[in-house]
Amino acid sequence: MSRVDRRSGYWDRDKETMSGPARERYQARWLAELVELAWEKAPGVRRRLEHAQLGPAQLRRPADLARLPVIKKSEMPDLQRMDPPFGGFCTEPLDRIRRIFVSPGPILEPMGPEWSAWHVEACLYAGGFRPGDVVLNTFLYQLVPAAHEIDEALSLIGCTVVPTGVGNTDTQVTTARAVGATGFVGTPSFLMTVLKRAEEMGGGRLAFQVAQVGAEALPESLRRQLEEDYGIMTRQGFGTADLGMIAYECPEKSGMHLVDDAIVQVCDPQSGEPLAVGRIGEIVATVNHRTYPMIRFATGDLTVLTDEPCPCGRTAPRMLGWRGRADEVTKVRGMFIHPRQVDEVAARARGLARWQVVVGREGHQDTLTFRAELTPGAEGAAVRGVVEAAIRDVMKLRGSVEVVPAGTIPEGAKKIADERKWD
Ligand SMILES: [Zn+2]
Protein backbone atom coordinates (compact mmCIF):
# COMPACT_ATOMS: atom_id res chain seq x y z
CA MET A 1 0.00 0.00 0.00
CA SER A 2 1.54 3.29 -1.03
CA ARG A 3 1.50 6.29 1.29
CA VAL A 4 -2.06 7.34 2.05
CA ASP A 5 -3.45 10.40 3.83
CA ARG A 6 -3.82 9.26 7.40
CA ARG A 7 -4.35 12.66 8.98
CA SER A 8 -7.39 14.25 7.37
CA GLY A 9 -11.00 13.16 7.32
CA TYR A 10 -13.33 11.65 9.88
CA TRP A 11 -15.01 8.31 10.35
CA ASP A 12 -18.28 10.05 11.18
CA ARG A 13 -17.99 13.76 10.43
CA ASP A 14 -21.48 14.66 11.69
CA LYS A 15 -20.87 13.20 15.12
CA GLU A 16 -17.23 14.10 15.55
CA THR A 17 -17.67 17.77 14.67
CA MET A 18 -21.02 18.51 16.32
CA SER A 19 -21.39 21.57 18.54
CA GLY A 20 -21.44 21.30 22.33
CA PRO A 21 -25.24 21.65 22.56
CA ALA A 22 -25.76 19.18 19.70
CA ARG A 23 -23.52 16.66 21.46
CA GLU A 24 -25.51 17.11 24.65
CA ARG A 25 -28.75 16.47 22.75
CA TYR A 26 -27.23 13.40 21.05
CA GLN A 27 -26.05 12.01 24.37
CA ALA A 28 -29.35 12.80 26.08
CA ARG A 29 -31.14 10.84 23.35
CA TRP A 30 -29.11 7.67 23.69
CA LEU A 31 -28.90 7.96 27.46
CA ALA A 32 -32.68 8.05 27.84
CA GLU A 33 -33.06 5.01 25.55
CA LEU A 34 -30.28 3.15 27.30
CA VAL A 35 -31.69 3.73 30.78
CA GLU A 36 -35.16 2.63 29.64
CA LEU A 37 -33.69 -0.54 28.14
CA ALA A 38 -31.59 -1.32 31.22
CA TRP A 39 -34.55 -0.68 33.53
CA GLU A 40 -36.56 -3.28 31.59
CA LYS A 41 -33.87 -5.87 30.81
CA ALA A 42 -30.99 -5.52 33.28
CA PRO A 43 -32.09 -6.23 36.87
CA GLY A 44 -28.68 -5.23 38.24
CA VAL A 45 -29.04 -1.74 36.79
CA ARG A 46 -32.63 -1.52 38.00
CA ARG A 47 -31.56 -2.45 41.55
CA ARG A 48 -29.00 0.37 41.53
CA LEU A 49 -31.54 2.90 40.35
CA GLU A 50 -34.17 1.77 42.84
CA HIS A 51 -31.62 1.90 45.63
CA ALA A 52 -31.01 5.57 44.73
CA GLN A 53 -34.79 6.08 44.47
CA LEU A 54 -34.52 6.90 40.80
CA GLY A 55 -36.42 5.72 37.75
CA PRO A 56 -35.77 6.21 34.01
CA ALA A 57 -37.68 9.50 34.14
CA GLN A 58 -35.04 11.00 36.43
CA LEU A 59 -32.06 10.03 34.26
CA ARG A 60 -32.69 11.60 30.87
CA ARG A 61 -29.83 14.06 30.41
CA PRO A 62 -26.08 13.73 31.03
CA ALA A 63 -26.35 16.23 33.91
CA ASP A 64 -28.92 13.98 35.63
CA LEU A 65 -26.31 11.24 36.05
CA ALA A 66 -24.79 13.00 39.07
CA ARG A 67 -27.86 11.85 41.04
CA LEU A 68 -26.84 8.20 40.73
CA PRO A 69 -24.00 7.02 43.01
CA VAL A 70 -21.07 5.59 41.04
CA ILE A 71 -20.40 1.88 40.76
CA LYS A 72 -16.80 0.95 41.43
CA LYS A 73 -14.87 -1.63 39.44
CA SER A 74 -13.93 -3.32 42.72
CA GLU A 75 -17.62 -4.03 43.41
CA MET A 76 -18.09 -6.02 40.19
CA PRO A 77 -16.70 -9.45 41.25
CA ASP A 78 -19.07 -9.63 44.25
CA LEU A 79 -22.07 -8.39 42.26
CA GLN A 80 -21.40 -11.03 39.61
CA ARG A 81 -21.02 -13.77 42.22
CA MET A 82 -24.39 -12.82 43.70
CA ASP A 83 -26.16 -12.69 40.33
CA PRO A 84 -24.16 -14.77 37.82
CA PRO A 85 -22.86 -14.46 35.24
CA PHE A 86 -22.94 -10.65 34.70
CA GLY A 87 -24.33 -9.26 37.97
CA GLY A 88 -27.61 -8.43 36.24
CA PHE A 89 -25.94 -5.82 34.03
CA CYS A 90 -26.51 -7.61 30.73
CA THR A 91 -29.66 -6.78 28.74
CA GLU A 92 -29.54 -9.87 26.51
CA PRO A 93 -30.33 -13.52 27.27
CA LEU A 94 -27.30 -15.79 27.25
CA ASP A 95 -28.25 -17.44 23.94
CA ARG A 96 -27.78 -14.10 22.14
CA ILE A 97 -24.30 -13.48 23.53
CA ARG A 98 -21.53 -13.98 20.96
CA ARG A 99 -18.62 -14.09 23.39
CA ILE A 100 -17.94 -13.96 27.11
CA PHE A 101 -14.68 -12.40 28.20
CA VAL A 102 -12.91 -12.97 31.50
CA SER A 103 -10.98 -10.01 32.88
CA PRO A 104 -8.90 -10.00 36.06
CA GLY A 105 -11.09 -9.82 39.16
CA PRO A 106 -12.52 -12.05 37.82
CA ILE A 107 -15.06 -9.92 35.97
CA LEU A 108 -17.06 -11.34 33.05
CA GLU A 109 -18.00 -9.16 30.10
CA PRO A 110 -20.52 -10.09 27.39
CA MET A 111 -20.18 -9.35 23.68
CA GLY A 112 -23.72 -9.01 22.41
CA PRO A 113 -25.31 -9.65 19.03
CA GLU A 114 -24.87 -6.09 17.73
CA TRP A 115 -21.85 -4.87 15.79
CA SER A 116 -19.96 -1.73 16.63
CA ALA A 117 -21.17 -1.88 20.22
CA TRP A 118 -17.91 -0.37 21.45
CA HIS A 119 -17.74 2.48 18.92
CA VAL A 120 -14.00 2.02 18.33
CA GLU A 121 -14.04 2.77 14.59
CA ALA A 122 -13.85 6.57 15.01
CA CYS A 123 -10.88 6.13 17.38
CA LEU A 124 -8.88 3.98 14.97
CA TYR A 125 -9.73 6.17 11.98
CA ALA A 126 -8.57 9.26 13.88
CA GLY A 127 -5.41 7.32 14.70
CA GLY A 128 -4.69 6.91 10.99
CA PHE A 129 -6.10 3.49 10.01
CA ARG A 130 -7.65 3.47 6.54
CA PRO A 131 -9.54 0.97 4.37
CA GLY A 132 -7.07 -1.40 2.75
CA ASP A 133 -4.62 -1.50 5.65
CA VAL A 134 -3.38 -4.97 6.54
CA VAL A 135 -3.05 -4.96 10.32
CA LEU A 136 -1.15 -7.20 12.71
CA ASN A 137 -3.23 -7.37 15.89
CA THR A 138 -0.80 -8.45 18.60
CA PHE A 139 -3.12 -7.94 21.58
CA LEU A 140 -4.11 -11.02 23.58
CA TYR A 141 -7.01 -12.86 21.93
CA GLN A 142 -7.69 -15.10 24.93
CA LEU A 143 -9.91 -14.20 27.89
CA VAL A 144 -9.88 -10.37 27.63
CA PRO A 145 -11.87 -8.20 25.18
CA ALA A 146 -9.45 -5.56 23.81
CA ALA A 147 -8.13 -7.57 20.83
CA HIS A 148 -11.68 -8.50 19.76
CA GLU A 149 -13.02 -4.94 20.06
CA ILE A 150 -10.23 -3.63 17.87
CA ASP A 151 -10.44 -6.59 15.50
CA GLU A 152 -14.13 -5.89 14.88
CA ALA A 153 -13.58 -2.13 14.45
CA LEU A 154 -10.77 -2.69 11.93
CA SER A 155 -13.04 -4.98 9.92
CA LEU A 156 -15.77 -2.33 9.93
CA ILE A 157 -13.29 0.29 8.68
CA GLY A 158 -12.30 -2.02 5.85
CA CYS A 159 -8.93 -3.26 7.05
CA THR A 160 -7.64 -6.81 6.81
CA VAL A 161 -6.79 -8.18 10.26
CA VAL A 162 -4.05 -10.70 10.96
CA PRO A 163 -4.78 -11.96 14.51
CA THR A 164 -1.21 -12.79 15.47
CA GLY A 165 -1.75 -12.31 19.22
CA VAL A 166 0.98 -11.92 21.81
CA GLY A 167 4.62 -12.98 21.46
CA ASN A 168 6.28 -15.15 18.78
CA THR A 169 8.40 -12.25 17.58
CA ASP A 170 9.99 -14.11 14.66
CA THR A 171 6.60 -15.25 13.38
CA GLN A 172 5.30 -11.68 13.68
CA VAL A 173 8.18 -10.41 11.55
CA THR A 174 7.87 -13.16 8.93
CA THR A 175 4.09 -12.67 8.76
CA ALA A 176 4.30 -8.88 8.58
CA ARG A 177 6.63 -9.24 5.59
CA ALA A 178 4.59 -11.97 3.91
CA VAL A 179 1.34 -9.98 4.02
CA GLY A 180 2.93 -6.54 3.61
CA ALA A 181 1.38 -5.36 6.89
CA THR A 182 0.87 -1.59 7.00
CA GLY A 183 -0.67 -1.43 10.46
CA PHE A 184 0.16 -2.65 13.96
CA VAL A 185 -1.94 -2.98 17.10
CA GLY A 186 -0.38 -3.86 20.46
CA THR A 187 1.86 -2.52 23.19
CA PRO A 188 4.42 0.13 22.19
CA SER A 189 7.28 -1.89 23.66
CA PHE A 190 6.33 -4.94 21.59
CA LEU A 191 6.13 -2.82 18.45
CA MET A 192 9.71 -1.74 19.09
CA THR A 193 10.73 -5.36 19.74
CA VAL A 194 9.24 -6.45 16.40
CA LEU A 195 10.93 -3.59 14.53
CA LYS A 196 14.34 -4.37 16.07
CA ARG A 197 13.97 -8.09 15.43
CA ALA A 198 13.11 -7.36 11.79
CA GLU A 199 16.38 -5.44 11.48
CA GLU A 200 18.35 -8.34 12.99
CA MET A 201 16.66 -10.85 10.69
CA GLY A 202 17.58 -8.79 7.61
CA GLY A 203 15.43 -8.23 4.55
CA GLY A 204 14.77 -4.52 4.98
CA ARG A 205 12.28 -2.47 6.92
CA LEU A 206 8.76 -3.61 7.71
CA ALA A 207 6.04 -1.70 5.87
CA PHE A 208 4.22 -0.45 9.00
CA GLN A 209 2.81 3.06 8.54
CA VAL A 210 0.33 3.26 11.40
CA ALA A 211 0.03 1.85 14.92
CA GLN A 212 -2.54 1.89 17.68
CA VAL A 213 -0.79 1.14 20.94
CA GLY A 214 -2.05 0.59 24.45
CA ALA A 215 -2.07 -1.47 27.66
CA GLU A 216 1.04 0.36 28.87
CA ALA A 217 2.41 3.89 28.96
CA LEU A 218 3.72 5.43 25.74
CA PRO A 219 6.71 7.60 26.65
CA GLU A 220 7.06 10.56 24.25
CA SER A 221 10.68 9.53 23.60
CA LEU A 222 9.50 6.14 22.32
CA ARG A 223 6.75 7.72 20.23
CA ARG A 224 9.27 10.09 18.66
CA GLN A 225 11.51 7.16 17.78
CA LEU A 226 8.60 5.24 16.23
CA GLU A 227 7.40 8.24 14.26
CA GLU A 228 10.69 9.83 13.21
CA ASP A 229 13.00 6.83 12.84
CA TYR A 230 10.45 4.36 11.51
CA GLY A 231 7.80 6.65 9.99
CA ILE A 232 4.94 5.00 11.90
CA MET A 233 2.04 7.24 12.93
CA THR A 234 1.58 6.07 16.52
CA ARG A 235 -1.56 6.86 18.54
CA GLN A 236 -3.14 5.59 21.74
CA GLY A 237 -6.48 5.55 23.48
CA PHE A 238 -7.92 5.13 26.93
CA GLY A 239 -10.27 2.33 27.82
CA THR A 240 -11.09 -0.44 30.23
CA ALA A 241 -12.40 -3.97 29.71
CA ASP A 242 -15.76 -2.92 31.16
CA LEU A 243 -16.25 0.26 29.13
CA GLY A 244 -14.31 -0.31 25.92
CA MET A 245 -12.32 2.60 24.50
CA ILE A 246 -13.71 5.92 25.74
CA ALA A 247 -11.04 8.38 24.56
CA TYR A 248 -8.58 8.49 21.68
CA GLU A 249 -5.82 10.58 20.16
CA CYS A 250 -6.33 12.39 16.87
CA PRO A 251 -3.54 13.40 14.44
CA GLU A 252 -2.71 16.35 16.74
CA LYS A 253 -1.85 13.97 19.64
CA SER A 254 -2.68 16.70 22.14
CA GLY A 255 -4.81 14.72 24.55
CA MET A 256 -7.55 12.16 23.89
CA HIS A 257 -10.95 13.14 22.50
CA LEU A 258 -13.87 11.64 24.37
CA VAL A 259 -15.98 9.17 22.39
CA ASP A 260 -19.42 10.61 21.56
CA ASP A 261 -21.05 7.39 22.72
CA ALA A 262 -19.53 7.72 26.18
CA ILE A 263 -20.50 10.33 28.76
CA VAL A 264 -17.32 10.90 30.70
CA GLN A 265 -17.41 12.88 33.91
CA VAL A 266 -14.34 13.75 35.95
CA CYS A 267 -15.48 13.39 39.53
CA ASP A 268 -14.45 13.91 43.13
CA PRO A 269 -13.05 10.44 44.01
CA GLN A 270 -14.65 10.59 47.44
CA SER A 271 -18.12 12.02 46.81
CA GLY A 272 -18.58 11.10 43.13
CA GLU A 273 -19.64 14.71 42.36
CA PRO A 274 -18.67 15.91 38.86
CA LEU A 275 -15.93 18.54 38.91
CA ALA A 276 -15.43 21.58 36.69
CA VAL A 277 -13.39 21.18 33.51
CA GLY A 278 -9.70 21.58 34.34
CA ARG A 279 -9.83 19.93 37.76
CA ILE A 280 -8.14 16.58 38.42
CA GLY A 281 -10.57 13.82 39.34
CA GLU A 282 -11.65 10.24 38.78
CA ILE A 283 -12.90 9.11 35.38
CA VAL A 284 -16.55 8.06 35.70
CA ALA A 285 -18.12 6.88 32.45
CA THR A 286 -21.49 5.89 31.06
CA VAL A 287 -21.24 4.08 27.75
CA ASN A 288 -23.84 3.61 25.03
CA HIS A 289 -23.35 -0.16 24.98
CA ARG A 290 -26.80 -1.67 24.68
CA THR A 291 -25.82 -5.20 25.67
CA TYR A 292 -23.78 -4.19 28.71
CA PRO A 293 -24.78 -0.68 29.77
CA MET A 294 -22.28 0.55 32.32
CA ILE A 295 -23.89 3.59 33.90
CA ARG A 296 -21.73 5.84 36.11
CA PHE A 297 -18.87 3.34 36.22
CA ALA A 298 -15.91 4.65 38.27
CA THR A 299 -12.63 3.50 36.77
CA GLY A 300 -10.31 4.37 39.66
CA ASP A 301 -8.14 6.34 37.22
CA LEU A 302 -7.51 10.06 37.45
CA THR A 303 -7.44 12.54 34.63
CA VAL A 304 -8.16 16.17 33.77
CA LEU A 305 -10.28 17.41 30.85
CA THR A 306 -9.91 20.36 28.52
CA ASP A 307 -12.54 21.86 26.21
CA GLU A 308 -10.05 24.04 24.30
CA PRO A 309 -10.68 23.69 20.54
CA CYS A 310 -8.50 21.11 18.76
CA PRO A 311 -7.03 21.97 15.32
CA CYS A 312 -8.18 18.57 13.98
CA GLY A 313 -11.76 19.86 13.95
CA ARG A 314 -13.13 17.25 16.34
CA THR A 315 -15.16 19.05 18.95
CA ALA A 316 -15.29 16.50 21.77
CA PRO A 317 -13.42 17.54 24.94
CA ARG A 318 -10.06 15.90 25.52
CA MET A 319 -8.62 13.93 28.38
CA LEU A 320 -5.14 15.19 29.19
CA GLY A 321 -3.41 11.94 30.02
CA TRP A 322 -3.49 9.59 32.94
CA ARG A 323 -2.82 11.26 36.28
CA GLY A 324 -2.60 8.26 38.61
CA ARG A 325 -4.99 6.15 40.67
CA ALA A 326 -7.89 7.59 42.60
CA ASP A 327 -7.18 5.55 45.72
CA GLU A 328 -3.84 7.32 46.13
CA VAL A 329 -5.14 10.89 46.24
CA THR A 330 -5.17 13.17 49.24
CA LYS A 331 -7.44 16.20 49.44
CA VAL A 332 -5.75 19.41 50.54
CA ARG A 333 -7.74 22.63 50.81
CA GLY A 334 -10.30 21.21 48.40
CA MET A 335 -7.73 20.15 45.79
CA PHE A 336 -6.63 16.58 45.16
CA ILE A 337 -2.93 15.88 45.16
CA HIS A 338 -1.38 12.69 43.92
CA PRO A 339 2.05 11.03 44.48
CA ARG A 340 2.84 11.56 40.80
CA GLN A 341 2.44 15.32 41.23
CA VAL A 342 4.91 15.18 44.13
CA ASP A 343 7.48 13.65 41.80
CA GLU A 344 6.58 16.16 39.09
CA VAL A 345 7.38 18.96 41.54
CA ALA A 346 10.63 17.29 42.55
CA ALA A 347 11.68 16.82 38.92
CA ARG A 348 11.74 20.60 38.44
CA ALA A 349 14.40 21.16 41.11
CA ARG A 350 18.03 20.22 41.19
CA GLY A 351 19.79 19.06 44.35
CA LEU A 352 17.07 16.88 45.87
CA ALA A 353 18.18 13.55 47.34
CA ARG A 354 14.91 12.48 48.91
CA TRP A 355 11.55 14.18 49.34
CA GLN A 356 8.10 13.82 50.82
CA VAL A 357 4.99 15.96 51.10
CA VAL A 358 3.47 16.22 54.55
CA VAL A 359 -0.12 17.36 54.87
CA GLY A 360 -0.93 18.81 58.27
CA ARG A 361 -3.47 21.03 59.93
CA GLU A 362 -3.05 24.43 61.59
CA GLY A 363 -6.21 25.74 63.16
CA HIS A 364 -8.86 25.15 60.50
CA GLN A 365 -6.42 25.24 57.58
CA ASP A 366 -4.66 22.38 55.80
CA THR A 367 -0.92 22.87 55.45
CA LEU A 368 1.29 21.42 52.77
CA THR A 369 4.98 21.01 53.52
CA PHE A 370 7.49 19.70 51.01
CA ARG A 371 10.22 18.03 53.08
CA ALA A 372 13.53 17.83 51.24
CA GLU A 373 16.85 16.15 51.86
CA LEU A 374 19.49 17.80 49.71
CA THR A 375 22.42 16.33 47.84
CA PRO A 376 25.85 17.50 49.08
CA GLY A 377 26.60 21.05 47.96
CA ALA A 378 23.01 21.94 47.05
CA GLU A 379 21.86 25.44 47.99
CA GLY A 380 18.85 25.31 50.32
CA ALA A 381 17.47 28.73 49.43
CA ALA A 382 17.62 28.08 45.69
CA VAL A 383 15.90 24.70 46.01
CA ARG A 384 13.23 26.27 48.20
CA GLY A 385 12.37 28.92 45.62
CA VAL A 386 12.13 26.45 42.73
CA VAL A 387 10.08 23.92 44.68
CA GLU A 388 7.62 26.48 46.03
CA ALA A 389 6.98 27.76 42.52
CA ALA A 390 6.60 24.18 41.24
CA ILE A 391 4.04 23.38 43.95
CA ARG A 392 1.94 26.37 42.91
CA ASP A 393 2.25 25.41 39.27
CA VAL A 394 1.70 21.64 39.48
CA MET A 395 -0.64 21.31 42.46
CA LYS A 396 -2.36 24.73 42.26
CA LEU A 397 -1.69 25.10 45.98
CA ARG A 398 0.57 27.14 48.20
CA GLY A 399 3.11 25.06 50.12
CA SER A 400 6.25 25.56 52.12
CA VAL A 401 9.57 23.79 51.82
CA GLU A 402 11.40 22.38 54.80
CA VAL A 403 15.01 21.30 54.30
CA VAL A 404 15.74 18.41 56.66
CA PRO A 405 19.01 16.61 57.52
CA ALA A 406 19.93 13.54 55.47
CA GLY A 407 18.32 10.41 56.87
CA THR A 408 15.18 12.16 58.19
CA ILE A 409 12.85 10.74 55.51
CA PRO A 410 12.80 6.98 55.93
CA GLU A 411 13.56 4.66 53.01
CA GLY A 412 10.34 3.70 51.22
CA ALA A 413 8.36 6.49 52.94
CA LYS A 414 4.99 7.44 51.43
CA LYS A 415 5.21 10.27 48.87
CA ILE A 416 2.35 12.00 50.68
CA ALA A 417 2.12 11.63 54.44
CA ASP A 418 -1.23 12.77 55.77
CA GLU A 419 -0.62 13.82 59.39
CA ARG A 420 -3.92 15.57 59.93
CA LYS A 421 -5.84 14.57 63.01
CA TRP A 422 -9.57 15.14 62.93
CA ASP A 423 -10.55 14.55 66.57
ZN1 LIG B 1 -8.13 16.61 17.78
Image: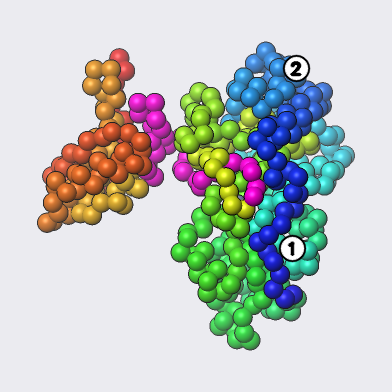
State whether residue 320 is above or below residue 153.
above
Tell me where the magenta segment starts and ends, as one range: 313-341
Image quadrant occupied by the C terminus: top left
The residue depicted at 67 percent of the width and 55 percent of the height is 126
Frontmost of labels 1 and 2 is 1
- State the residue position of label 2: 57
Residue 234: quadrant of the picture: bottom right
The residue depicted at 36 percent of the width and 42 percent of the height is 394
| Number of marks | 2
Image quadrant occupied by the N terminus: bottom right
Which of the labelled discs sits on residue 130, or is there none? Answer: 1
Left-right relation of 378 to 98:
left
The answer to whether residue 214 is seen in the rendering is no
Residue that sits furthest to the bottom in the current view? 203
Circle 1 crowding by C-alpha within 10 Å: few under 14, some 14–19, many from 20: many
Q: How is the image coloured?
A: rainbow
- In depth, the one of 74 and 369 nearer the eye is 369
Position in image of residue 272 (x %, y %) = 54, 26
Left-right relation of 169 to 354:
right
- The amino acid at mark 2 is Ala
- The amino acid at mark 1 is Arg
Q: Earlier in the sequence, mark 1 or mark 2?
A: 2
Q: Is residue 290 magenta?
A: no
Q: Element at badge 1?
A: loop
Position in image of residue 403 (x %, y %) = 16, 42
Circle 2 crowding by C-alpha within 10 Å: few under 14, some 14–19, many from 20: few
The residue depicted at 63 percent of the width and 86 percent of the height is 203
Position in image of residue 384 (x %, y %) = 19, 44
State whether residue 111 is above or below residue 376.
above
- In depth, the one of 146 and 411 nearer the eye is 146
